[in-house]
Amino acid sequence: MTKADKKTSASDMTEHFSAMLAPLLDLPPTPGNQRVVYLHTPFCRSHCNYCPFYRHPAGKLKDFAQTTVKMIRALGQRPFVADSPFSVYFFGGGTPTILAPDDMGFLLAELTKNFRPAIGHEFTVESTLTRISPKMLDILKRNHVTRVSIGLQTFDENRRKMLGRPATRQEMVSKIKIARESGLETSLDLMYGIPGQMPEDLAEDVKLATDLGVDNISQYRLQLFDGAPLKKGIERGRISAMPSYDQVMETRLAGAQSALEAGYSHWNVKNFGKTKTTRCEYTLTPHEDRDMIPLGAGAGGQIGPKSIFTLPDADDYREAVRKGLYPVFRTGETATKQRVDRKVKGLLESGEVLLDKLAPDSVSLAYSRLEKLLEKEIVEKKDNAYRLTQGSFLDYERALDFTSSRG
Ligand code: SF4
């Protein structure tokens, strides 16, 4: 198949999926469903060494904003979008704040005009540290954004350089202070499992973040992906080896202890909130069976059991939107068992599972999964609530790996 043939067949698929999804978008929304919008931009200013995600170097940003507004306006006419408001918005990437402030303002204004925010909605925008500025934050705030989520990874200058994100500690602290002063909620991503990182290093990163008063800290593990420059660096001996699983666990624990000592609450396996009520609703989306409309290039979402993925290539995306299509390149059906497992996993990661709170058609599958976990001492049961044991809460990746024999 030539390149041109491949393009034509991809475009035929998009036409097919766009037509297939049309009836869904003409239905009224499911009553009571806390609906979500996920908007994705594939653009980044530079490539972080560890990152496997699809990306485009910054370019054609205005074009992306205009194309996305066109898509937003078209979908905004459909009953499924127009007939009731949205509770949760997430603008991720890539780097959303790579857009020029005016383009960002235009895009967000059109988004919230066509996808109306519900009272008390949550709207998170991801940003790299370098793209934080008073002007950008002001635009976010004026357009219904409630939280900025900063991918900091670490305060350690040498490790940031190794990850391809150089910045001085002074710059990091000053940008976080700017974000805090904007009045938006702040969430900070901190990474563990970085080559050379010791448990006390993550503990210190967390302490700095809590001293700065960020509202939420998300601790996540560095993964090594094929093709990522970091992997090549390690293979060629230019970068120290990845730490062992036990070291990684020790580091994760040290970070958690540091957050707890600062009075933060451990509300989800990966997240620590400044107050007992801090929550990032978007994190709870995968197991709450919420309808999530994907917008932009390279976004994923679902309506009912149907998963939907938009075209990842910015040019294909523009072309499909220009033709008036929903720029989808793949859809699928989530099987009931998969959906129930996702729910059990998500509920355990954030607290507990109570069988009588589940939809009647999920109870028997959830019960059988939970009883297996109980037998293996991954969960414990008290007053009809299943919770992860203390050890499993820390080692949740292994404990909740339902594909392995443990689950
Ligand atoms: S900014 Fe985010 S998406 Fe872009 S290359 Fe870095 S880690 Fe990947």
Image (spheres, rainbow, N blue to C red):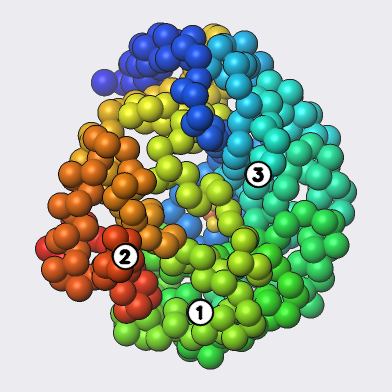
Q: In this view, does 208 lie to the left or right of 389?
A: right
Rendered position, 268 above or below 192:
above
Seen from the viewer's position, the closer of residues 1 and 112 is 112
Q: Check disc 2 and report the residue beneath it.
A: 383
Rendered position, 333 above or below 373:
above
Seen from the viewer's position, the closer of residues 149 and 362 is 362
- Element under disc 2: loop
State which tag comes first along the sequence, 3 or 2: 3
Q: Residue 256 carries which label?
A: 1
Q: Check disc 3 and report the residue beneath it.
A: 122
Seen from the viewer's position, the closer of residues 95 and 182 is 182
State which tag comes first along the sequence, 1 or 2: 1
Rendered position, 78 above or below 64:
above
Q: Residue at x 49, y 31 (%)?
A: 33
Q: Which mark is residue 352?
A: none
- Element under disc 3: strand
Q: Residues within 10 Å of mark 2 (few under 14, many from 20)?
A: few
Please state which amino acid type lies under the numbered disc 3. Answer: Glu
x and y percentages locating residue 81 in the rendered image: 57, 19
Please state which amino acid type lies under the numbered disc 1. Answer: Ala
Seen from the viewer's position, the closer of residues 152 and 317 is 152
Q: Residue at x 19, y 67 (%)?
A: 374
Task: Answer with the quadrant where ligand 1 appears in the image.
Answer: bottom right
Q: Residue at x 48, y 49 (%)?
A: 284
x and y percentages locating residue 91 in the rendered image: 62, 42
- Element under disc 1: helix
